[in-house]
């Protein structure tokens, strides 16, 4: 899981750098932004899963390796405490909530990006200049580079 987290952060860094490059086409920029959003989403799920797993591992490690007087003659109590540290069912409960939260945030960012792109003037001299600049950028990217 730690290796996966490191790889996700490297992928996120690479995509952030690609996002800042001007020469990426509109579809390429959209794909890079989607990659960043997906990487952030998967990273948060992975971190929560790692925390839950660490809580379980540390809790059961402490129960096995340290003598607690309370549990010497009470195996049922020991079993109950071990089950309290087992939080994976909680993760199954939290996953849809986390997913819904992230998807709503991603949707908000998409709408803001779309509004920003649509805010560009489309009529008159300013619209003509903006359209010419877009065409010029695409031509220089694809045919002159």
Image (cartoon, helix red, strand yellow):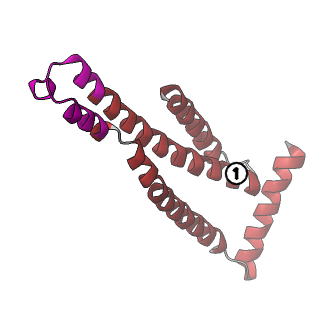
Question: Which secondary structure dominates the residues rendered in magenta?
Answer: helix
Q: Quadrant of residue 51?
A: top left
70 in magenta: yes
Specify whether 80 is left or right of 43. Answer: left
Q: Residue furthest left?
A: 69
Q: Residue at x 24, y 36 (%)?
A: 81
Q: Quadrant of residue 97?
A: bottom left
**Depicted 57 relative to depicted 133: above or below:** above
31 in magenta: no
Pick the front one: 49 or 117: 49
Pick the front one: 86 or 7: 86
**Depicted 14 relative to depicted 57: above or below:** below
For label 1, the crowd category at 10 Å Cα-Cα, with few meaning under 14, some 14 to 19 and many 20 or more, is some
Tell how many labels. 1
Q: Residue furthest right?
A: 143
Give the percent coordinates (x, y) of residue 106. 55, 60
Q: Residue at x 51, y 65 (%)?
A: 104
SS type, badge 1: helix
Query: What residue range appears in magenta?
Result: 60-83
Specify whether 33 is left or right of 51. Answer: right
Which quadrant is the C terminus positioned in?
top right
Q: Residue at x 49, y 57 (%)?
A: 96
Give the percent coordinates (x, y) of residue 34. 64, 52
Specify whether 75 is left or right of 32. Answer: left
Q: Residue at x 22, y 34 (%)?
A: 76
| Residue under numbered circle 1 | 31
**Depicted 121 relative to depicted 15: above or below:** below
Pick the front one: 106 or 99: 99
Give the percent coordinates (x, y) of residue 83. 31, 38
**Depicted 120 relative to depicted 143: above or below:** below
Give the percent coordinates (x, y) of residue 48. 41, 42
């Amino acid at each position: 899981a730690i290796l996966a987290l490191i790889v996700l952060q490297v992928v996120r860094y690479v995509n952030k750098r690609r996002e800042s490059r001007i020469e990426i086409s509109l579809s390429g920029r959209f794909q890079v932004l989607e990659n960043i959003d997906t990487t952030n989403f998967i990273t948060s799920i992975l971190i929560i899963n790692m925390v839950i797993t660490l809580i379980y591992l540390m809790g059961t490690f402490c129960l096995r390796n340290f003598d607690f007087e309370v549990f010497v003659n009470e195996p049922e109590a020991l079993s109950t405490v071990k089950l309290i540290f087992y939080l994976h069912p909680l993760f199954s409960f939290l996953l849809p909530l986390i997913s819904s939260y992230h998807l709503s945030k991603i949707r908000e960012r998409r709408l803001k990006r779309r509004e920003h792109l649509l805010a560009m003037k489309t009529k008159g001299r300013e619209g003509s200049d903006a359209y010419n600049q877009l065409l010029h950028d695409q031509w220089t990217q694809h045919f002159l580079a």
